[in-house]
Image (cartoon, grey):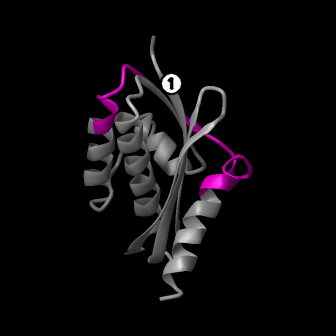
């Protein structure tokens, strides 16, 4: 029997570039949260943060031994680059795109969904929390 996980990812940068964080929520098919990730990733851009969040999410899904993943992102750029509607021309994003593409080969099946920001509030909250906690130090 295959194991399917639903991943919500978000990356945020305060300043773009600026202090950045990632938020990832991984749920089972019934919607039960299997893992939350909130991590400060230093100064970078929104797009790098979005890709980094996805990389963390995919790595965690592999650790959890998922066969299939449904990736939910509110980043139109990320969704369209991964579905090959847009080319990945930015030199800073190319290695991240390649890493995501490599991680996706670890799954029998995957789906990338572009969702509205209102459907991604949990991951957004985790990304902002990571940036906010870091600014306290």
Identify the residue at image location x=50%, y=50%. Answer: 77
Q: Which residue lies furthest to the right in this view?
A: 118
- Would you name the residue on which mark 1 appears? 4
Identify the residue at image location x=39%, y=56%. Answer: 52
Q: Which residue lies furthest to the top in this view?
A: 1
Q: Nearer the viewer, residue 80 or 108?
A: 108
Q: Residue 6: horizontal and vertical position, in percent?
A: 55, 34
Question: Regarding mark 1 in the picture, which secondary structure is present there?
Answer: strand
Whether residue 33 is visible to the viewer of this picture, yes or no, is yes
Magenta stretch?
103-123
Quick check: 134 above or below 83?
A: below
**Circle 1 residues within 10 Å: few <14, some 14–19, many ≥20:** many
Image quadrant of residue 86?
Answer: top left
Q: Which of 54 and 112 is in front in this view?
A: 54
Quick check: 77 above or below 102?
A: below
Whether residue 14 is visible to the viewer of this picture, yes or no, is no
Q: How many marks?
A: 1
Q: Report the quarter where the N terminus lies.
A: top left
Quick check: 65 above or below 117?
A: above
Q: Residue 55: horizontal and vertical position, in percent?
A: 37, 48
Image quadrant of residue 66?
Answer: top left
Q: Is residue 122 magenta?
A: yes
Identify the residue at image location x=39%, y=50%. Answer: 56
Q: Residue furthest bottom?
A: 137
Q: Is residue 30 left or right of residue 132?
A: right
Q: Residue 85: horizontal and vertical position, in percent?
A: 45, 36
Q: Residue 95: horizontal and vertical position, in percent?
A: 25, 53
Q: Is residue 35 magenta?
A: no
Identify the residue at image location x=64%, y=36%. Answer: 32
Quick check: 111 above or below 33?
A: above
Q: In this view, does 23 lie to the left or right of 48?
A: right
Q: Nearer the viewer, residue 86 or 108?
A: 108
């Amino acid at each position: 029997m295959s194991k399917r996980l639903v991943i919500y990812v978000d990356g945020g940068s305060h300043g773009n570039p600026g202090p950045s964080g990632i938020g990832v929520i991984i749920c089972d098919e019934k919607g039960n949260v299997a893992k939350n990730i909130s991590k400060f990733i230093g100064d970078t851009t929104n797009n790098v943060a979005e890709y980094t969040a996805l990389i963390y999410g995919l790595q965690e899904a592999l650790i959890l031994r998922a066969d299939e993943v449904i990736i939910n992102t509110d980043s139109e750029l990320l969704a369209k680059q991964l579905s090959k509607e847009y080319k990945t021309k930015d030199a800073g994003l190319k290695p991240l795109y390649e890493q995501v593409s490599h991680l996706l080969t670890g799954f029998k099946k995957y789906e990338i969904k572009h969702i509205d920001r209102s459907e991604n509030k949990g991951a957004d909250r985790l990304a902002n929390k990571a940036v906010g906690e870091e600014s306290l130090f």
